[in-house]
Amino acid sequence: MISQRQIVALRLAAALALIALGLMVWSLLQPRPIPVIVAMSVGQLLGTLSFGTFLYVLVADLRSGPPKT
Amino acid sequence: MSRLSSLAQISLVCALGAMAILIVFLALRPRITHAVKVWLLLSLGVLPIGAAATGNIEGYETTKKRAFCGSCHVMGRHQADAEDPKSDSLAARHARNKMFGEDNCYMCHADYGMYGTVLTKLGGLRHVWLYYTQYRDVPLDRALETIRLRSPYPNANCMQCHSTDDMLWLRIPDHASSLQDVRAGRISCASAGCHGYAHPFDPQSKLEGTR
């Protein structure tokens, strides 16, 4: 069973991923120095943080075992 | 906006797909069921990784393009000269060569050493820093008076293609007589006495023109 804290973490991961993906889209549509550099640095960092948070929740969920009936 | 490459299109589809799922997830706040977990795996894992992998390659390739270098206004005249079919500058003649093509700035200015790509990209970051801290508001004519290479242009870059070993090349008397100096970098291929400056408005080129 996913706890309230993990749900908040998932929402945070979703928000971070949205920002990271937005930066990536910006760099693809406007291939100028600042968008490309920001997407390949800040975007990567936020995307990795987001994926790490998701993995953390996933592993915690798997370790908690199947839901009790 | 220039036409997107197929790699950029794949990245865009992955990114927009993931964003659509995430917006629905944040807006609807659904219960975390098995199906929602699978959608999250797609939108936080599979699709963003796809977007990042293809987007990074695309970003790297973009930084090699002449249009990218020319997107800072101080490089506008360099870009225009390279694209001018009537220009006989070294840069323009090389840009017309398909081996150089759209990547002609990078092909000539890249560091070809073992860590060349990394060093070239670090140099590029330095250019961006200088542009935004010193040149952003400087008029083009004034900028061209001060922009110059940090160190002499290495003949080794020319020698990536012009090996200096070819008999046709060595048959030219000036090449044969200056061979050791060219290889050692004591004489620059891109100088007034040899093949001329790479760009017609280089500060050094102007100085020699007034003498």
Image (cartoon, rainbow, N blue to C red):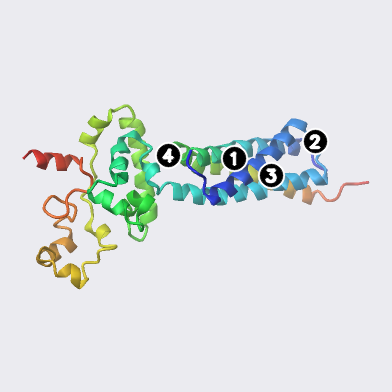
Q: Which residue is drawn at 14% across and 55% down?
A: B194
- Give the residue at the far right of this rendering: A69
Q: Which mark is residue B30?
A: 2
Q: Are marks 3 and 2 on the same chain?
A: yes
Please, what is the three-letter code of the amino acid marked with disc 1?
Leu
Give how far across and how far down residue B135 sits, in percent: 31, 31
- Describe the element under mark 2 as helix, strand or loop: loop
Q: Which amino acid does label 2 sit on?
A: Pro
Q: Is residue A62 shown left or right of residue B90?
A: right
Label 3 vs label 4: CA separation?
A: 27 Å
Query: Which one is earlier in the sequence, the residue at label 3 or at label 2?
Result: 2
Alpha-carbon distance for marks 2 and 1?
22 Å
Q: What residue type is labelled 4?
A: Pro
Gap between marks 2 and 4, in whole Å?
39 Å
Percent x, y of residue B35: 81, 46
Please state which amino acid type lies under the numbered disc 3: Ser
| Residue A56 can be seen, yes or no | no
Q: Is mark 3 on a helix, strand or loop?
A: helix
Residue ID for mark 1: A21
Q: In which quarter of the image is the C terminus of chain B?
A: top left
The residues bearing labels 3 and 2 have C-alpha atoms spaced at a distance of: 15 Å
Tag 3 residue = B43
Sequence-earlier tag: 1 or 4: 1
* Circles 1 and 3 on the same subunit: no
Q: Residue furthest left?
A: B211
Q: How crowded is mark 4: few (under 14 residues within 10 Å), some or many (20 or more)?
A: many
> Which residue in the structure is indicated by mark 4?
A33
Marks 1 & 3, CB-CB < 8 Å contact: no
How far across and down, in percent of the image, does residue B64 sit? 40, 49
What is the chain identity of the residue bearing mark 1? A
Distance from label 1 to label 3 (Cα)? 10 Å
Query: Looking at the picture, how far across and down is residue B163, in whole percent?
Result: 25, 66
